[in-house]
Amino acid sequence: MLLSRKKLHGNYDDLIGESTVHLEVLKSIDRFAKSAKIVLISGETGTGKELVARALHAESLYAMHPMVIVNCAGIAEHLIENELFGHEKGAFTGADDQHIGLFETASESTLFLDEIGELPMPLQPKLLRVLQENEMRRVGGTEQIPVSVRVLTATNIDLIKAVEAGRFRRDLYERLKPLHIQLPALRERREDIPALAKHFLTKENNASNRKVANINPEVLSLFHAYSWPGNIRELEGIIGRAVLLAEEDEILPHHLPSDVRMPHIHASPLADETAAANPNAAGCFVLSFPMGTTLQEIEKAAILATLARENGNRSKTAAALGISRVTLNTKLRTYSDEA
């Protein structure tokens, strides 16, 4: 069945993109949002896990109350239990007053536990009990306090590997995993890059009072060829930098960091064999495509990868591909219009 935003019930305008993998994420958000069950959001750093959590909260039954966010990796190990569950007066030296923890603060709302994979092992069984029993006890207290909280969690590590390594409890993982949203890396949804870039361009123009109207097609070509280790967050930062560097109304290749302008092409074993057979084939690389890729898609990938290898130089790109510069310009305009 063809995926479409029109079939979704919620408003996900802040989650930019129309790729199939991205629409699958929106579909999962739409299905899980109204539930009170725990959701695990996983993905590489910079893929937008907090944005997904905010979307889940905004479309939930708890949206009238603010979401409470805690970064499990950002709180010292000896303090995190106190932050989550609070403490009673006199629980320890310096506890002069009762402290209400984040589970109680988030009552009737959403508690987002970011970087859940970094939660200290001694605290994991206590969190598991809260998730199972919907009640908690403050540090130094004896009373079990009922809690009504919708919990969202996120991680950029592989929790299965963490379980196998003894760094994460299997019973807690089993509690978290039933409703799971896996976010794709930006390199897995390259067709969304132009829309994301334009979104961040508008955002940066508004924030910095600039009027950079366009992104040059060669920049989009370089973006298409880049590996994006920092994902969407990296793209936003690069656009923000380019807007500040742009002299006129367009982002050009020289406004980009050098690693984006000169992406590394990783040669496959076949590329090594080809280079060995032809010593003059300097910089030889091989592009691989899944079965079912159209000739048009293969041609586009070859042109954009060659343009990236030649650092955006159209004359060298055309020569390497054996086509005229006019033909190359025509094809690049077509790719820009598709974006």
Image: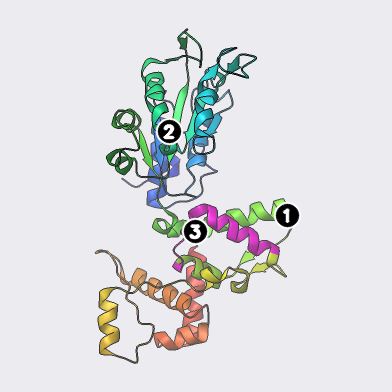
Name which residue type carries label 2: Pro
Choose between 112 and 246: the one closer to the eye: 112
Q: 230 left or right of 176? A: right
Q: In this view, does 146 lie above or below 275?
A: above
Q: Name the residue under label 1.
A: 208
Kindly identify the residue that appears in the image at 46 percent across and 83 percent down: 317
* Label whose residue precedes the other's in the sequence (3 or 1): 3
Alpha carbon of mark 3 to alpha carbon of mark 1: how far? Answer: 22 Å
Return the x and y of residue 30 as percentages of the image width and height: 42, 34
Q: Are marks 2 and 1 in contact (CB under 8 Å)?
A: no
Of labels 2 and 1, the one closer to you: 2
Alpha carbon of mark 2 to alpha carbon of mark 1: how far? Answer: 40 Å
Name which residue type carries label 1: Ser
Task: Identify the magenta region.
Answer: 225-244
Q: Mark 2 points at which residue?
A: 120
Mark 1 neighbour density, 10 Å: few (under 14) some (14–19) many (20 or more) = few
